[in-house]
Image (tube, rainbow, N blue to C red):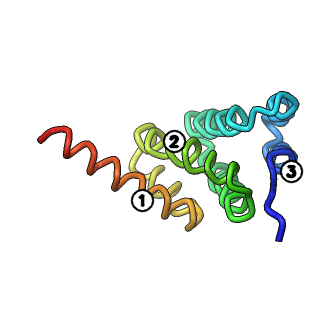
Amino acid sequence: MNKINEQSASQFLANHYDEIKEEINDLSTRRNMAGIFQAIVNHINYLLANGQIEKIGIRLKYIGWLYKRGNEQICNLIENLFVRSFRDMKRRCTTEQWIYMYQHIPRNLKQIYLLQDKNCNLITQKSFI
């Protein structure tokens, strides 16, 4: 099975993130996949700040789908840019919002988040010793 490359991923994301479609297309023409994922993180933070949390669950599912089918570069960007942003999102949320969001994080992304969070906590603990 062929994995989804950057160009196909850009098209998929532009089709599923209508509000920032132009920005995604612009970044795609410059072959800036990291910029696309950062734009999506910014968009999700915007939705969160405006109380549109229901939309976030759907957006997270798109990224989970892409992670399952993406090539190595896509998966690395999702792990290192998108999933790492969950920690900041959690800080911006109320407890109720985070519970709702966490329930909608796809399993594959949740596993990565939990592993990253565990590793971050270990590093933080070691730095205090």
* Residue 127 in the image, given as x and y percentages of width and height: 20, 39
Marks 2, 3: nearer the viewer? 3
Relative vertical location of residue 20 with respect to residue 90 in this rendering, above or below: above
Residue type, mark 2 in image: Ser
Q: Count neighbours of disc 3 (C-alpha within 10 A) and say few if under 14, some if 14 to 19, many if 20 or more.
A: few
Residue type, mark 3 in image: Ser
* Residue 109 in the image, given as x and y percentages of width and height: 56, 59
* Residue drawn at the location 53% of the way across and 54% of the way down: 101
Which residue does the numbered mark 1 point to in the structure image?
114
Q: CA distance from mark 3 to mark 1?
A: 28 Å
Q: Seen in the image, is 83 located left or right of residue 118?
A: right
Residue type, mark 1 in image: Leu
Which residue does the numbered mark 2 point to in the structure image?
85
Q: Which of the numbered marks, if any, corresponds to residue 8?
A: 3
Q: Quadrant of residue 22?
A: top right
Relative vertical location of residue 16 with respect to residue 27 in this rendering, above or below: below
